[in-house]
Amino acid sequence: MPTRPAQVIANGQPVAADVPCTLEQFLLAQGQRPRSVVIEHNGEAVAPSEFARRPLRAGDRLEIVQIVAGG
């Protein structure tokens, strides 16, 4: 399926994305490692194991939180 330029809302800000794509593809395009974040997609928490299968479409809303390791 061909992609097209569109916008999604990530952490309250519009972000360009080639959609449709998966959450994993979107994260990689943004320079983020999929295993270092947690995501809420359109109000629903998404398990990291689902990132490669969860489709992202124009206008979708994401909350992306970076996981920080420490002690």
Image (cartoon, rainbow, N blue to C red):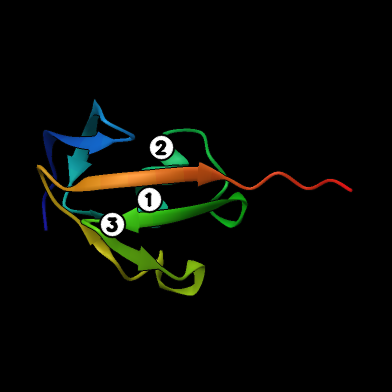
Secondary structure at badge 3 equals strand
At label 1, the amino acid type is: Gln
Q: Which residue is drawn at the image coordinates 37% and 65% (left, top)?
A: 45
Side of 57 where 52 appears, left or right: right
Q: Is disc 2 surrounded by few (<14), some (14 to 19) or many (20+) residues within 10 Å? A: few
Q: CA distance from mark 3 to mark 1?
A: 14 Å
> What x and y, as percent, mark residue 49?
49, 73
Circle 3 residue: 41
Marks 3 and 2, the one that precedes in the sequence:
2
Marks 3 and 1, the one that precedes in the sequence:
1
> What x and y, as percent, mark residue 14?
21, 26
Q: Is disc 3 surrounded by few (<14), some (14 to 19) or many (20+) residues within 10 Å? A: some
Is 35 situated above or below 46? Answer: above
Q: CA distance from mark 3 to mark 2?
A: 17 Å
Q: Nearer the viewer, residue 28 or 42?
A: 42
At label 2, the amino acid type is: Ala
Quadrant where the N terminus lies?
A: bottom left
Circle 2 residue: 29
Secondary structure at badge 2 equals helix
Is 44 situated above or below 61? Answer: below
Q: Which residue is drawn at the image coordinates 33% and 71% (left, top)?
A: 53
